Image (cartoon, rainbow, N blue to C red):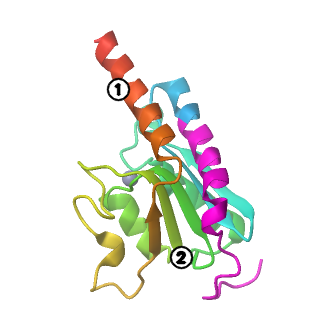
Amino acid sequence: MGEPFLGDDTLPRVGDDDRYMDLALAEARAALAHEDVPIGAVVVRDAAVVGRAHNRREVDADPTAHAELLALREAAARLGRWRLADCALYVTIEPCVMCAGAIVLARVALVVFGAPDERAGAVRSVAEVLDATWSNHRPRWRLGARREEAERVLQEFFARQRGAS
Ligand SMILES: [Zn+2]
């Protein structure tokens, strides 16, 4: 694996977003098998998926086991480096404060999320961590790929939970 560089050659284009978001949505649905909130993420570098994960907070009893963190760890392990400046992260819903912080620390170049999280999203909803002026790395981001599908997966999960309780 080459060293990261700051060009865009290894990053997906807008036209690729639906395809990679579909992989993130498939990851999200895998979380349903263990009753975790269905959120999925994939890390893409040079048209290859180098990390993919879903939320495992409940099954692992781990407050940090969010899809984004697990996918970033997998990508870093695979590439053999923590700096992911040539990678894009796709996630089905807007990242929380912890995950947005990890995205900045990993120097991720681009974040694409499906649906906003008005209660806890730290990209545009309750905080703007990726655009923080104090940071020396500001990942680019865009919103809305497969938004309706990303919202439906979550709404169906919470509707089932309400029905079960
Ligand atoms: Zn998170």
Q: Residues within 10 Å of mark 1 (few under 14, many from 20)?
A: some
Q: Position of residue 96 (x, y in %)?
A: 33, 55
Read off the magenta span: 1-28
Q: Which residue matches tag 1?
A: 158
The amino acid sitting under disc 2 is Ala
Q: Disc 2 on helix, strand or loop? A: loop
Q: SS of the residue at dot 1?
A: helix
Q: For mark 2, what is the residue?
A: 109
> Residue 162 in the image: x percent, y percent?
29, 17
Q: Is residue 153 magenta?
A: no
- What residue is drawn where x is 53% and y is 38%? 28
Q: How many marks?
A: 2
Relative to 133, 153 lies left or right: right
Which quadrant is home to the N terminus?
bottom right
Does residue 13 show up?
yes
Q: Which mark is residue 23?
A: none
Residue at left 42%, top 74%? 104
Image: 111 above or below 64: below
Q: Quadrant of the C terminus?
A: top left
Could you tell me residue 118's position as x and y percent?
A: 26, 50
- Would you place residue 59 above or below residue 134 in this image? above
Q: Nearer the viewer, residue 142 or 129?
A: 142
Discs 1, 2 touching: Cβ within 8 Å:
no
In this view, 24 is above or below 108: above
* Rendered image quadrant of residue 11: bottom right
Q: Which of marks 2 and 1 precedes in the sequence? A: 2
Tell me the kind of residue under disc 1.
Answer: Phe
Q: Residue furthest right?
A: 1
